[in-house]
Image (spheres, grey):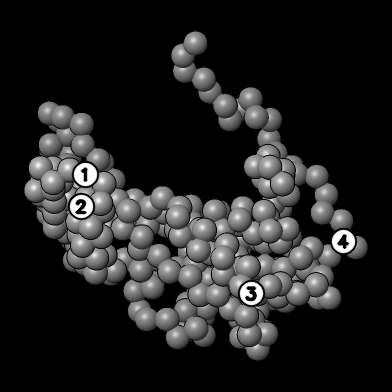
Amino acid sequence: MNFEEIVKHRRAIRYYDPEKPLDTARVEHCLRLASLAPTSSNLQLWECYHITDPTVIASLAPACFSQTAVTTAQQLVVFVTKPRLWRQRTHELIELYRADTRKHHPEDKWAKYDKLRADYLLKVIPFTYSRGLGLWGLIRKGLVQITGLFRPVPRQMSEGDLTAVQHKSCALVAQTFMLAMSAEGYDTCPLEGIDTLRVRRLLGLPRGTKINMIVSCGIRDDHRPVGDRIRVPFESQYHRIGE
């Protein structure tokens, strides 16, 4: 399929064919492709849990309100955000960027790029991502509002704002995964109608882990009508600025 066909093939499928299993290795490959999706500051504060055990899927179904997209699924992928990973990621990225600089840039540029990236990762990121019962987020927000009187600044600096940023980044990963699955001829359904606390406990995930969404996986049951895509008129959403 070309890209347009992939996008049109991807649907939120609610009933999967139990007689058509998935190749687990191909699903994992789609997740590897999804890891190439962009994330804010390239921090990659997400993880995924690829569930292939039917017993675990059955145990999660009640926490997903027994939706058929889960009860008929061959596999599930639980996408989560992990805000506390930012400290680990900054140090990992410094080393990765350092190696990348030496691979792609002349030696006389190494010190410059090393300093730019270290300053960002070791100064800007800690300022932005540090948490303190919401208080540090309020302080950050106040500081940027004052600074914003004199120059452009990023305004979304509260702890709630940063949580939204992490979920947006994780959603880009999940969407890339669903498109990759469509390219394989597989089907998916993104689910937010879930009891996230129960899901976290059932999977034994540590505190601080935030469930972004569950994506169920399978091959659509052709005996179930999918119907047309219902969308509001594109003209009500599209606004061109310029010639």
Q: Which mark is residue 102?
A: 2
Check disc 4 and give the amino acid type. Asp
**SS label for mark 3:** helix
Q: Nearer the viewer, mark 3 or mark 2?
A: 2
Q: Nearer the viewer, mark 3 or mark 4?
A: 3
Q: In the image, is 240 to the left or to the right of 168? A: right
Residue 59 higher or lower than 223, as above or below: below
Residue highlighted by disc 4: 222
Crowding at dot 1, Cα within 10 Å, few <14 / some 14-19 / many 20+, comes out as few
* Spot occupied by residue 42 in the image (x, y as percentages of width and height): 32, 53
Residue 92 higher or lower than 138, as above or below: below
Q: Earlier in the sequence, mark 3 or mark 4?
A: 3
For the residues labelled 3 and 2, the Cα–Cα distance comes to 37 Å
Crowding at dot 2, Cα within 10 Å, few <14 / some 14-19 / many 20+, comes out as some
The image quarter in which residue 228 lies: top right
**SS label for mark 4:** loop
Q: Earlier in the sequence, mark 3 or mark 2?
A: 3
For the residues labelled 3 and 1, the Cα–Cα distance comes to 39 Å
For the residues labelled 4 and 2, the Cα–Cα distance comes to 53 Å
Q: Earlier in the sequence, mark 1 or mark 4?
A: 1
* Spot occupied by residue 76 in the image (x, y as percentages of width and height): 61, 73
Q: Nearer the viewer, mark 4 or mark 2?
A: 2
Residue highlighted by disc 1: 105
Check disc 2 and give the amino acid type. Arg
Q: Earlier in the sequence, mark 4 or mark 2?
A: 2
**SS label for mark 2:** helix
The image quarter in which residue 98 lies: bottom left
Q: Nearer the viewer, residue 170 or 7?
A: 7
Q: Which mark is residue 24?
A: 3
* Spot occupied by residue 39 in the image (x, y as percentages of width and height): 38, 52
Name the residue at the bottom extreme: 55
Instruction: Confirm or deny contact between disc 3 and disc 2 (CB under 8 A).
Output: no
